[in-house]
Image (cartoon, rainbow, N blue to C red):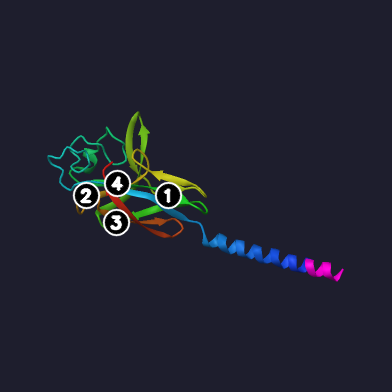
């Protein structure tokens, strides 16, 4: 009988220690991470360039995030713009990206593309929600990080550093290669 109680006591301690370890590892994992980031190539002065890479917005070129066929020349004038895309993966509680920064542009905004009155329109959003244990893809024609007023050309093969801030206060540094769509 003593052996049974001793065995039971040891079994309870093992279960108790295993439970402590599980809760510790649960708090150490989680949160938003980034997968497959990239930035659209763009030139600061696109005059004469018909590549559609989004520089001089008075040309009828596809806008970042629009997926093609829609221009925002009146919205940004001659300001050189680009966009960053990536997959936001969340292995924890629901969170959101609430801010983006980069030294390659004068202004960095979170955007989404919506259909309004049968017209695709790009809108700034306050946050990009990432569900618990889920993911959100930032892609042309959807959510994206808009780089407005480029400080330099973004050539294929370059790398752009973007800092994302989550609602929970975490900062994520993203190194995104520049490529043509």
* Residues under numbered marks 1 and 4 in contact, where contact means CB atoms less than 8 Å apart: no
Among numbered discs 3 and 1, the one appearing first in the sequence: 1
Q: Which disc, if any, is residue 9?
A: none
The residue mark sitting in front, 3 or 2, is: 2
Count of number-bearing discs: 4
Q: Where residue 113 appears, x then y in whole percent?
A: 35, 39
Neighbour tally class for label 3: few under 14, some 14-19, many 20 plus, Cα within 10 Å:
some
The residue mark sitting in front, 3 or 1, is: 1
Neighbour tally class for label 2: few under 14, some 14-19, many 20 plus, Cα within 10 Å:
some
Q: What is the distance, in whole Å, between disc 2 and disc 1 at their CAs?
A: 24 Å
Q: Which disc, if any, is residue 102?
A: 3
Quickly name the residue at label 2.
155
161 vs 27, left or right, is left
Q: What is the distance, in whole Å, between disc 3 and disc 1 at their CAs?
A: 18 Å
Q: Which disc, if any, is residue 88?
A: 1
Among numbered discs 2 and 4, the one appearing first in the sequence: 4
């Amino acid at each position: 009988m003593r052996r049974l109680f001793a065995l039971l006591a040891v079994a309870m301690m093992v279960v108790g220690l295993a439970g402590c370890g599980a809760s510790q590892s649960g708090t150490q994992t989680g949160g938003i991470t980034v997968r497959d980031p990239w930035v659209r190539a763009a030139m600061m002065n696109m005059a004469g360039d018909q590549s559609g890479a989004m520089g001089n917005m008075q040309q009828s070129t596809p806008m970042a995030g629009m997926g093609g066929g829609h221009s925002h020349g009146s919205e940004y004038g001659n300001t050189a713009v680009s966009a960053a895309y990536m997959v936001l993966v969340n292995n924890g509680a629901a969170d959101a990206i609430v801010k983006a920064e980069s030294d390659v542009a004068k202004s960095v905004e979170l955007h989404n593309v919506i259909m309004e009155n049968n017209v695709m329109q790009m809108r700034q959003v306050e946050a990009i929600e990432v569900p618990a244990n889920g993911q959100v893809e930032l892609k042309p024609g959807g959510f994206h990080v808009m780089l407005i007023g480029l400080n330099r050309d973004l050539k294929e093969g370059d790398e752009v550093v973007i800092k994302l801030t989550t609602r929970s206060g975490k900062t994520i540094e993203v190194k995104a290669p520049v490529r043509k769509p």
